[in-house]
Amino acid sequence: MEGPCSPPTVSFSLQEVNLNDATHELRGSVTGVKNKANISLTLDGKAHNGFQFAPATGDLSAKFKLAPGSHTVVVSVNNDCGTDVKSESVTLEEEEEEEACGIRINPGNSDWQFCLVTPSGTYNRGNLSSSNFSYSGPARSIYFLPIGGGGTATVNGRPYTIKSGQYYLFTGNINVSVSTSNPGSMGQWSVCITAGSEPVSGNGNNRPKSPCETQNDDDKSKAKDDDKSKGQNDDKSKANDDDRSKAKADNKSQANDDDRSSVKDDEKSNRQANDRTIRTGSRR
């Protein structure tokens, strides 16, 4: 005699996961069923056969990669004694794309091609050699070359279009953020700018001068002045040496003249003494 017939049961839940091939995972259990053929799973009304069932334990699992919107998963199990059906729905919000806050830039090869002057110091292209560098705050000026279609700055509360291939110099009351992590930067260097006045821009012979370039020129000019001053000091020192040498030569010449004069005086004195001796002898 056969025992009492038990209808099947099913229970499951959907969990959000962060995997390359899935956004959600189903985990559940089934009783009264020993064959996968007695289980039906649908996603949004369409059969989904990519689920796993372990008859020995009754474990049920599946993975789904769901797009934004509403989705419904239905699991149905059956045996000779009946059927059980469970469903669960999830809704994925449309992800808002993070809007780029500024302009991607080309750091360039020379220090002057990027220049940021802030109350706390001046930064140039050399600082951008480290991806860990970032600055966010007030600035007196910023100089850069945009790439990749330019971008947008905020000038007097309104969007200001930045064109690629042009050097830009913002000065005055500005606030900037320089980083490789700005929204829309995609790991490249970018600048987000809020300014009270429009920038100066141009390329070639018409490009604005970089504040860092001016500083370098001042350093070069100072070096030239130092070299010139050093040269003048060297000339003065040489002149002093020449004067001292001439004085020594004059003193030596004077000494020689004095020696010759002294010798002449001695010779004269000797002659006079000899003459007196001769005259005295003659009188005797």
Image (spheres, rainbow, N blue to C red):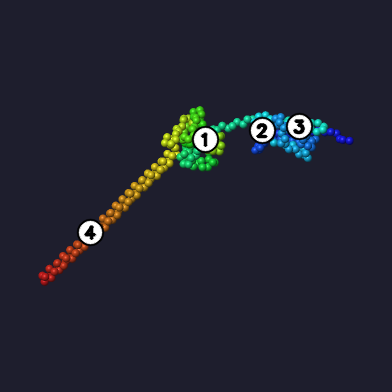
> According to the image, label 1 marks what residue?
148
Under mark 3, the amino acid is Ser
| Alpha carbons under labels 1 and 3: distance apart | 53 Å
Residue 98 visible in this rendered orientation of the protein: yes
Secondary element at tag 3: strand
Q: Determine the CA span between mark 2 and mark 4.
A: 115 Å
In primary-sequence order, the first of circles 3 and 2 is 2
Calculate the distance from the C-alpha at mark 3 to the C-alpha at mark 2.
Answer: 21 Å
- Picture residue at 34% right of the left edge, 49% below the top: 234
The residue that label 3 is drawn on is 76
Of the two numbered discs 2 and 4 on the same chain, state the one appearing first in sequence: 2
Q: Quadrant of residue 91?
A: top right
Instruction: Name the residue located 75 percent from the left edge and 31 percent from the top edge.
Output: 86
As displayed, is residue 197 above or below residue 284?
above
Which residue in the protein does label 4 denote?
A: 257
Q: Dot 2 corresponds to which residue?
A: 66
Disc 4 residue crowd, few under 14, some 14–19, many 20+, Cα 10 Å: few
Quadrant of the frame with the C terminus = bottom left
The amino acid type found where label 4 is placed reads Asp
Q: Is residue 141 visible?
A: no
Amino acid under label 1?
Answer: Gly
Between 139 and 157, the one nearer to me in the picture: 157
Rendering coords of residue 186 (x, y %): 56, 37
Q: What is the quadrant of the N terminus in the image?
A: top right
